[in-house]
Image: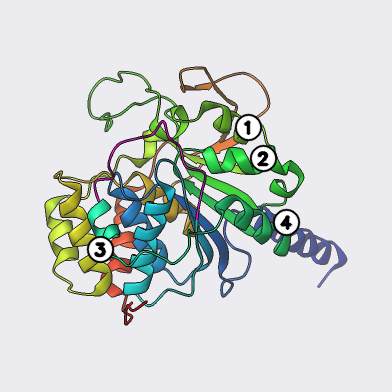
């Protein structure tokens, strides 16, 4: 082998290594991603499907689950029951900052209330997240699928610790397409998306934080769980799918939109929702506006729905989660 050929091979190997180092994929095939899930479960049904997806996926080491917005104690109780029934009670559950202005009864409150009330309130979600970041600096993905109240509080309380997150993945925003726009009709333009508009100051803090931020907006997350797929899931008769069946019926609507599970899928498999760098500003009404300037986020504008459902359905249908749920 000549010296020139040896040099070329060395350069190619170096480029391959560097490319893999910057990839969004986990570096080691057998490593589990450390994640914390921040959710407003109990209102819309997609949070319950997202939590089920997380629990059914061995790629994740779930350090804890925190609840956000409204009655965060009751939301934590709902999470606690799902963990108990699936044998995952080893995962810590913490309640985030309550939001009095959120108001309203949670659609799935009855399922949570049927679970024994803890002897003392759930601990502080914000304190918990900061403690975990200090314990595992630059290793944790914060998967935020709720209004950004907890995230904003983290940044406000300890911005330097927050910067030691590996990345933040959110379901939030609306870049070019709004609610109900599935891409078949002429574009009606974006809408203020719920998770962003609910707490604009906190969302702005996140977008300005300089932490690697991956955004799954309405443009890519409006995937419908049709009646055929629902029936397949609900017929499985496992503790996890039984919980989803009951929560779905308490939700009281027909076809779920799986906004939040898309963010879970991206965290696991970035190829399901490829991203592009963009500069996004948030206006006073909660619109996420593309603008000039250096990119501050990576945004997925189009998800691969077939690949998403292959992943989502296979995880829910093949899981064997079960536990003896006692307090």
Q: Is residue 250 left or right of residue 4?
A: left
x and y percent of residue 290 in the render?
Answer: 53, 22
- N-terminal label among 2 and 3: 3
Q: Secondary structure at mark 4?
A: helix
- N-terminal label among 3 and 1: 3
- Tell me if residue 289 is in the magenta stretch: no
x and y percent of residue 260 in the render?
Answer: 38, 47
Q: Residue at x 39, y 39 (%)?
A: 302
**Which residue position is annotated with label 1?**
205
Q: Secondary structure at mark 3?
A: loop
Query: Residue at the bottom extreme?
Result: 324
**Which residue position is annotated with label 2?**
155
Q: Name the colour scheme.
A: rainbow
x and y percent of residue 142 in the render?
Answer: 56, 52
- N-terminal label among 4 and 1: 4
Magenta part of the protein: which range?
95-108
Q: Label 4 crowding class (10 Å Cα cut-off): few <14, some 14-19, many 20+?
A: few
**Which residue position is annotated with label 4?**
18
Q: Nearer the viewer, residue 291 or 123?
A: 123
Give the label on residue 114, or none: 3
Q: Residue at x 59, y 28 (%)?
A: 204
The label nearer to you, 4 versus 3, is 3
Query: Whole-Å distance between the Cαs marked 2 and 1?
Result: 7 Å
């Amino acid at each position: 082998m000549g010296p020139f050929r040896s040099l070329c091979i060395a350069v190619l190997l170096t480029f391959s290594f560097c490319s893999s180092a910057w990839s969004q994929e986990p570096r080691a095939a057998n490593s589990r991603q450390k994640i914390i899930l921040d959710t407003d479960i109990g209102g819309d049904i997609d949070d319950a499907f997202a939590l089920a997806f997380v629990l059914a996926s061995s790629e994740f080491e779930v350090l804890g689950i925190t609840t956000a917005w409204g009655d965060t104690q009751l939301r934590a109780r709902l999470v606690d029951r799902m963990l108990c029934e699936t044998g995952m009670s080893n995962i810590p559950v913490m309640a985030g900052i309550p939001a009095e202005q959120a108001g309203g009864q949670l659609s799935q409150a009855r399922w949570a209330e049927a679970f024994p009330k803890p002897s003392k309130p759930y601990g502080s979600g914000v304190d918990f997240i900061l403690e975990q970041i200090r314990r595992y600096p630059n290793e944790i993905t914060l998967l935020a699928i709720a209004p950004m109240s907890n995230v904003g509080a983290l940044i406000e309380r300890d911005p330097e610790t927050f910067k030691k997150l590996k990345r933040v993945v959110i379901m939030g925003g609306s870049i070019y397409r709004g609610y109900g726009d599935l891409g078949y009709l002429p574009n009606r333009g974006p809408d203020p998306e719920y998770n962003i508009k609910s707490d604009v100051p906190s969302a702005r803090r996140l977008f300005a934080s300089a932490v690697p931020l991956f955004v799954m907006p309405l443009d890519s997350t409006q995937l419908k769980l049709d009646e055929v797929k629902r029936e397949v899931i609900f017929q499985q008769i496992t503790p996890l799918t039984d919980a989803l069946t009951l929560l779905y019926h308490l939700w009281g609507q027909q076809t779920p939109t799986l906004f939040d599970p898309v963010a879970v899928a991206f965290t696991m498999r970035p190829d399901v929702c490829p991203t592009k760098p963009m500069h996004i500003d948030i206006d006073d009404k909660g619109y996420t506006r593309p603008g000039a300037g250096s990119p501050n986020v990576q945004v997925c504008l189009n998800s691969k729905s077939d690949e998403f459902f292959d992943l989502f359905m296979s995880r829910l249908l093949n899981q064997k989660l079960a536990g003896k749920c006692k307090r």
